[in-house]
Image (cartoon, coloured by chain):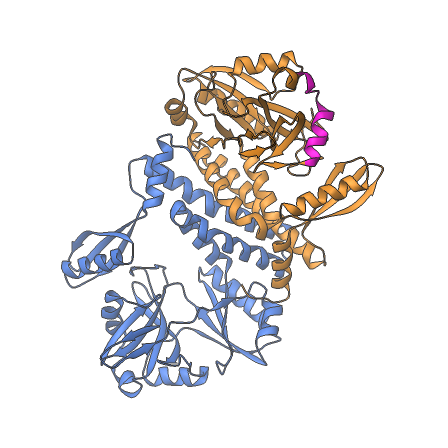
Chain colours: A orange, B blue
Amino acid sequence: MICFGDKIEIIRGFPKIRRTLMLSPSLKLHFSREVVVEEKMNGYNVRIALVNKKIIAFTRGGYICPYTTKRAPEIMEMTEFFTDHPDQVICGEMVGTENPYVTHHYREIGKLGFRIFDLREKASNKPMSIKDKIETLEFYGLPQVKFFGTIDVDEAPERIFQLVIELGMDDREGVVIKDPEMEIDPLKYTSSQAHNGEIQYAFTYPFDFGRSFFFSRVIREGFQAYELNESEDEIRKRAHTIGESIIYPMIKMIKHVADDNLASEDIVLHVDNLKEAEDFARHLRDLGVVATVHSYEDGKAIIRRVHQSTTDRISNFLRGGLY
Amino acid sequence: MICFGDKIEIIRGFPKIRRTLMLSPSLKLHFSREVVVEEKMNGYNVRIALVNKKIIAFTRGGYICPYTTKRAPEIMEMTEFFTDHPDQVICGEMVGTENPYVTHHYREIGKLGFRIFDLREKASNKPMSIKDKIETLEFYGLPQVKFFGTIDVDEAPERIFQLVIELGMDDREGVVIKDPEMEIDPLKYTSSQAHNGEIQYAFTYPFDFGRSFFFSRVIREGFQAYELNESEDEIRKRAHTIGESIIYPMIKMIKHVADDNLASEDIVLHVDNLKEAEDFARHLRDLGVVATVHSYEDGKAIIRRVHQSTTDRISNFLRGGLY
């Protein structure tokens, strides 16, 4: 919840979407007759709202993100929408290879794009029904996440498995399953490729993310293999992929630090000038991230984020430090 | 630290042995000219001491274990030793397939055995030098862990790697590296097979042990592969083994619970009568473990230990519960 104002304004946090580990029983238990299936994209969650007549973008935790606030209106035209619907919040995912938080390549997006999944009332957080949301977004020409259709709940598990497997083969994350009227909370379900992608990232920076990321991802893999009733060969392949997602990035990073490098990650941003890049690096530091502007040329800034625990602990062990 | 008595007696806790992730730099940093290498066995840590003229066995955390207190004197004759050395504590590992805490098969041990690694002064915790310890234990005919020799510290990393790889192929845990005078704290180093064995156990009961066991074991694997400068093939094999250690036991347990079973573990104990088995189950319950006597016949008791989180959470997800 974020409060503003002269006149106090309240913008609700985006509700956490719960996860199903077993599609078949949970969809029947959770939803009524039909479900809507939309794509879940791998980016960062953004809420965009009118605050004191300005369009402001918030990231998770209720932070005003200067980069997202600047870039979102460049990507999509929201003025008309907010003129007609000043009390609505646009909830969506900022995606693409050039964003400061979660980068992932989507061929239809490239460097930076935005996909909307919900329209919600500012103060109550009440979402529009799927039908109204789609019509509204189409009317204003605003970009939406992929809509995979409305499915009878009995057929949903099989159809969703098929979809998630296809999305996975295309290196895409998964789906969000919703009540058409949005009166029941949505659920999410993700691909094996998404789980492994996150494990790979976590074990690139093991002492920063390994411990917290790992467990839930492998649990998802276990239940997915079980529910799909996989063969021995399929299970073996899944096991080997997980092992590789852990060991390969970790050994690569140990070698990287042994060669006297930091465990760092470069973020590419398009900005108007160096000052804008420096402002954004400061914003990251305010969030507790170790970040500096590494280079700036012709509107392209590289911000270097250092994963300090991974750097420090690997260096220490390489020097003979004890565990 | 445990205190007793009429007259107050203090028995120090067994000091935690720190772990090296990188043999070569840490041995040079930590030790002086020579090191002693002994086998680290996979069982449970026990201290045995004379308390009010009785021989009492303590497990980690300072608990008096009724089973260990009863069985240790049946396995080895300590009376003469304690008559001559009432202020010494016997520190060792209870090992074998029939013990209530950590079971592991050793061909030279079978069901239950004890191996001593330290003799320490009760109040000060001061350990005997390796030479004195070995001579003392030999004199009293008490069983010792394997002694692999005294090695020049410069040659130690190579020799220890060779040893740990051989121990691993024999499904044994690893080594403890000590200062001959015991004036420097010992270090431990373990085999890949030991790491995987523990990951397999952890993911048999994922919601009880998965999260806490996992991370440190895969970190050990990463540094071991790095220090051994392994080939791509060797690293791939290591990765696949870890993946299998995670996924296979987890899926097996999901199926087991789906077939309406508990996530339980059976402990085999040899006792004199049913009451003794029941007393021990109560001791486990006092330690916070869910345990009951499952069966008793002819001196053989099976104590069933239930891993409640694993049972409950897997059942819940199988019924459609959300994560």
Is residue B200 something one can see in this rendering? Answer: yes
Q: Is residue A274 magenta?
A: no
Residue A112, picture quadrant: top right
Residue A114, picture quadrant: top right
**Outermost residue, front side:** A6
Percent position (x, y) of residue B155?
61, 74
Magenta stretch in the rendered image: A66-80
Front position in the image: B163 or A121 = A121
Percent position (x, y) of residue B265?
30, 50
Percent position (x, y) of residue A71?
72, 30
Percent position (x, y) of residue A234?
49, 34
Front position in the image: A177 or B116 = A177
Front position in the image: A196 or B212 = B212
Q: Magenta stretch mostly in which secondary structure?
A: helix
Taking the spot 31% from the left edge, 35% from the top edge, the residue there is: B259
Q: Is residue A68 magenta?
A: yes
Taking the spot 49% from the left edge, 31% from the top edge, the residue there is: A17
Q: Is residue A316 above or below residue A140?
A: below
**Outermost residue, bottom side:** B84
Is residue A97 something one can see in this rendering? Answer: no
Q: Is residue B227 above or below residue A20?
A: below
Q: Is residue A271 above or below residue A182?
A: below
**Outermost residue, right side:** A298
Taking the spot 39% from the left edge, 24% from the top edge, the residue there is: A30
- Judged left or right of residue A309, residue B57 is left
Residue A4, picture quadrant: top right
- Judged left or right of residue A52, residue B10 is left
Looking at the image, how many numbered discs can be counted on the residues? 0
